[in-house]
Image (tube, rainbow, N blue to C red):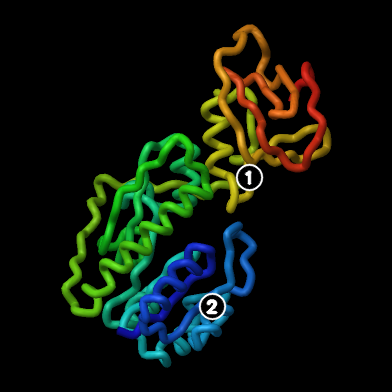
Amino acid sequence: MRILFIGAVEFSARTLTALIQMNSEIVGVCTLEKSPFNADHEDLTPIAHQAGIPSCYTPDINNSKTLAWIEEKKPDVIFCFGWSKLLKKPLLEIVPLGVIGYHPALLPQNRGRHPLIWALVLGLSETGSTFFFMDEGPDSGAILSQRKIEISSDDDAQSLYNKTTAIAIEQIRDFLPDLVKGTYKRHPQAEGQANSWRKRGKPDGRIDWRMSAEAIHNLVRGLGRPYIGAHFDYGDQEIKVWRTEIENPVPVNLEPGKILRSNSNGVLVKTGSGAVQLCEIEPQVVLREGVYL
């Protein structure tokens, strides 16, 4: 089975590498040399070239030049794992088996943008790993393979990213033989159960000390590496927060944003409910007890 691969993030690199190790017939790779909006961007060209696979940089996956390049490779199926733009009908219909996409959520729930970030920020206890046949809607096509993933209280963006990637590779190993033999099944999504998460912007990552300690902690978990980090302003500096811990109980008659303690373990800040200890910040600045953030 001839596979054309599209992707441009760390997840794409890991799954492409796994497919190569499975001795899959990858006939071409479409990727991005740079990305202004993916913090986990990865150019797949070095991986492709090392394996002797032709690659193509394409800022517009739907343009006629890219379509001609893909068609020339005569793929049976396209894998699109880690691409932030919608694919249009001509590309979706260019190959016999269609285009298989990936979304780290339990579709039809939680379609849309930033699924790992939202899952952590909202404090969800589970998410999913879903491969589906792409159509013209966002994450709305029939499901090929899906697994639930538990989110532990210790998970942050990096650990959940790693967890979903590992499970996704297991799924690929499972469904690839069915694709080759034509014994796979399509499971239509239940539209009545669907919701869609919106795109997040920089203001969504700003810490408001009036939030609860739990909400701030979850925000930091969700925006941790490989993403951009939660932040707050201190004077004219933007301070990134990479790791926090919740501390309770604390006095309720103190205002949010007040530094309650500052020592080698971090800085303890009163919040709208409880307090959070800032265990890792960047850049390292001196934040003294009694100061308000």
What residue is disc 2 on? 47
Residue type marked 1? Gly
Q: Residue at x 43, y 52 (%)?
A: 163
Q: Residue at x 48, y 80 (%)?
A: 29
Q: Residue at x 37, y 50 (%)?
A: 105
Give SS at disc 2. helix
What residue is disc 1 on? 229
Question: Between tags 2 and 1, which lies in front?
Answer: 2
Residue type marked 2? Ile
Give SS at disc 1. loop
Give the spatial CA distance, label 2 vs label 1: 28 Å
Q: Residues within 10 Å of mark 1 (few under 14, many from 20)?
A: many
The percent coordinates of residue 124 (x first, y second) are 40, 37
Q: Quadrant of the C terminus?
A: top right
Q: Which of the 4 image quadrants contains residue 88?
A: bottom left
67 on left or right of 282: left
65 on left or right of 88: right
36 on left or right of 53: right
117 on left or right of 275: left
